[in-house]
Amino acid sequence: MPTAVFRIHFASPVEPGVFEGGVALLRERGIPLVEYTAVASEEVLSEISLLRDEAQQWTPEDAVGLCEEAFGVSARLGPVTYISRGTDADAESVLARFDLVGRVQREIRDDGDVVTVMVSAADMRRVPESRLHTAMEAALNAEVRIELTAGLNAG
């Protein structure tokens, strides 16, 4: 499963000193963060991004609460995105987010990888193929081909 990036937006700006203290508190609690260079440049910050992989058990709501406690301001959850390393596991994770089961085959060529994703035509009736294709290309950074099959046995 890929690493999720939870963006937390603060209701009011956080001064650099307060921000540094909040970052230190989150790190003490084992919360991995996206690094920010803006703290050193004296900018006032209004968001932070927390990283969560499958080992962390906190929820998006937990992330908001942790940030409110660490930075002393109200916060809300912003966009959640995912870090992808372009692996077959990332492709399977994209399928799972669409509630699909599929088979992934990778062909390595001189000009780049070609990934074929086989999905049941019946399952694809509820998912726009263009959305799946776009998500797969973004996750894999490769040419993606989607093949619809009459039936598909997982495994």
Image: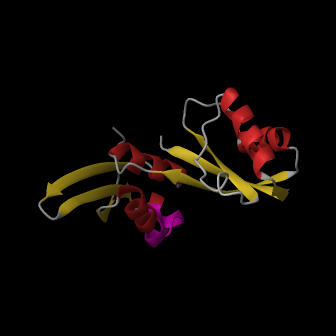
Q: Main secondary structure of the magenta part?
A: helix
Taking the magenta stretch, the answer to whether it contains residue 128 is: yes
Query: Left or right: where does residue 122 sit relative to residue 151?
Result: right
The percent coordinates of residue 132 (x first, y second) are: 45, 64
Residue at x 82%, y 44% (from the top left corner): 71
Taking the magenta stretch, the answer to whether it contains residue 17 is: no
The percent coordinates of residue 53 (x first, y second) are: 54, 37
- Please state which of residues 133 and 24 is positioned toward the viewer in this rendering: 24
Q: Determine the image quadrant of residue 68.
A: top right
- Please state which of residues 28 and 116 is positioned toward the viewer in this rendering: 28
Residue at x 20%, y 61% (from the top left corner): 112
Magenta-drawn segment: 124-131
- Please state which of residues 49 and 84 is positioned toward the viewer in this rendering: 49
Q: How many marks are shown on the rendered structure?
A: 0
- Please state which of residues 148 and 73 is positioned toward the viewer in this rendering: 73
Residue at the bottom extreme? 130
User: Visible in this render: residue 26?
Assistant: yes
Residue at x 76%, y 51% (from the top left corner): 16
User: Which quadrant is home to the C terminus?
Assistant: top left
Up/down of 99 relative to 26, above or below: below
Query: Left or right: where does residue 136 sit relative to residue 30?
Result: left
The percent coordinates of residue 24 (x first, y second) are: 70, 34
Q: Determine the image quadrant of residue 21.
A: top right
Residue at x 57%, y 46% (from the top left corner): 4
User: Visible in this render: residue 99?
Assistant: no
Up/down of 59 relative to 34, above or below: above
The percent coordinates of residue 40 (x first, y second) are: 65, 52
Query: Left or right: where does residue 40 sit relative to residue 143?
Result: right
Query: Left or right: where does residue 113 sit relative to residue 42?
Result: left
Residue at the left extreme? 110
